[in-house]
Amino acid sequence: MTLDISKVSIPSHPGIYIMKDETEKILYIGKAKNLKNRVKSYFLKNQNYKTQKLVEKITDIEFILTDNEEEAFLLEANMIKRYRPPYNIELKDQQRYTYLRITNEEFPRLMVARRTRTGQFLGGGKMYGPFTHGSSKMLSIGLLRKTFKIRICKKLPKEACLEYHLGNCDAPCQFKQAREDYNKHISDLESILKGKQRLEDFVKNLEKEMIQASENRQYEKAKEIHETLQRLGNLQVRQKMESPRIGTNEEYFGIKTKDQTAHLMSFRLANGVIKDRNKFSFDLVGDNTFSSFLSQYYSTNPIPRYVIVSEMPDKKEVLEEVFARSSGFTVHITVPTTGKRREIIDLIMKNISLEITKGADPALVELQERLGLQDIPRIIECFDISNHGEDYAVGSMSCLVDGKPQTSGYRKFKIKTVQGHNDFAMINEIVKRRYLRLKEEKSKMPDLVLIDGGRGQLNAALDAIHAIGVDIPCVSLAKENEEVYQPRVSKPLVMAKTNPALKILQHARDEAHRFGVAYNRAIRKFT
């Protein structure tokens, strides 16, 4: 039976999707900048034959969120290498992302780093990468070799070769000054590959050289520097999904508890590459703790040098000693607070939230956490008052289900008990009428009530809710600074304007306002 995609809650975030059949076998792993748009496209008509056959077999889809599309590329590659789904292309050349290697020779060379399937780098020297922008490996290699005068010969020749005469190498094989300068060139190159800040400094110097060359009418040189500046931008990307500088052997664990159940997820890194992801859960009964879980887990799994966790397990020192005895090397258990390790832990926690909320929109999950709600606010009802003179005042209510407008749930109210301009009393009236009726009908209450306005409007709505004896979370959103007012919290909550959780509240408020204005105009038109 084909999966009913309309019943699957799909996040609108970057990440990968894992399509499975009825036996839980992975059929296909894909990536997307927007998971919802990409996954739903599989279930549209007019697909090719093989895609139709794939869709017919799908009974479940799992999602793993990433922070951006580039990380989705990297994680997808690693997952495909591990599981080799039948509907994915198995690449013969596994080197999909460029790593660069500076050799450890007397006069080091710059090369593309090669790797085994397990992620181990081949050859000696220092590794840098990955560089996912710029489709050609040789574009970066050629650019950097030429810019920093790096030799390309396998063996040092006895005299200067063609590269010297083309201006691409200073010929350390022949000239003493070139030999003395070579280490400086390598040092400059390494400073570029190590991080964005030093690259910016280098770019500024190149820009000055370009301007100087242009003023001196050295237009070919200025053009060459301009092209170099454009291509150097390709080296600025740094990914936490795959970085040889995070560590050579690490495993990450995130843990979150809900309803007396612990939910865990792990990412294992080998040679800086996320090679595996697993998820677990256990009931919080007796001695079932994070510490006991780690002890059992590493009794049957390889022990890494670093165990990176979202929270410190009890008996940390005992665990480290046990792991050290079993592995033969020192093992560290740490909780990161900053840097790439913290970013990976944060990403794991985001994926755990997605898992335990059964695919709820991450923005709704964040809204639940920020407002301290007991349940995810899947149903949000928002109230607004639309005034036009003393004679024309109406109330309106929008309804969002899973973050999307459900227009069949919208309601409009004629004000019956309030005269003149009194928004507080009007809010009190329409909120009371709405939930008194739901209470009498024994209908389902919303997960969150949102009021358009500030502290005064919120208090008016809370008085109505308490008067009819129902228990519904209620907050208000003040339009001027987009502040969220909460009961029993003195300071309003301020979220970033780009925050997806705030955008859901804004959408509900804007819909209620639009609906109310339209109703007000309709009344005035026929009176």
Image (cartoon, helix red, strand yellow):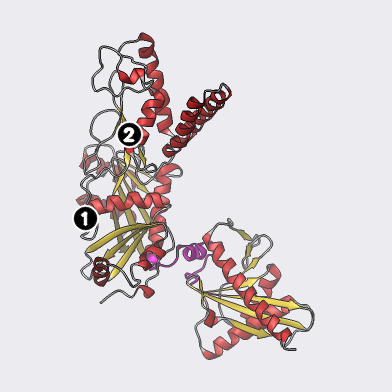
Q: Secondary structure at mark 1?
A: loop
Check disc 2 and give the amino acid type.
Answer: Leu
Most extreme residue toward the bottom, as rendered? 441
Q: What span is colored magenta in the figure?
A: 356-380
Q: Give 207 or 382, whichever is nearer the viewer.
A: 207
Q: Position of residue 219 (x, y in %)?
A: 51, 26
Relative side of 176 to 204, left or right: left
Q: Is residue 377 magenta?
A: yes
Q: Secondary structure at mark 2?
A: strand
Q: Give 480 or 465, whichever is nearer the viewer.
A: 480
Callouts 2 and 1 close, C-beta under 8 Å: no
Q: Which residue is mark 2?
A: 100
Q: Which residue is mark 1?
A: 84
Relative side of 372 to 351, left or right: right
The residue under the point 45% across, 32% down is 228
Q: Is residue 232 above or below residue 215?
A: below
Q: Is residue 453 above or below residue 323?
A: below
Q: Rate crowding at label 1 as few (under 14), some (14 to 19) or many (20 or more) other CA atoms within 10 Å.
A: some
Q: Position of residue 16 (x, y in %)?
A: 35, 58
Q: Position of residue 131 (x, y in %)?
A: 37, 40
Q: Give 492 or 332, whichever is nearer the viewer.
A: 492
State the mark number for residue 51: none
Q: Position of residue 320 (x, y in %)?
A: 30, 43
Relative side of 512 to 50, left or right: right
Q: Rate crowding at label 2 as few (under 14), some (14 to 19) or many (20 or more) other CA atoms within 10 Å.
A: many
The residue under the point 56% across, 62% down is 502
**Is residue 276 visible to the viewer in this orientation of the structure?**
no
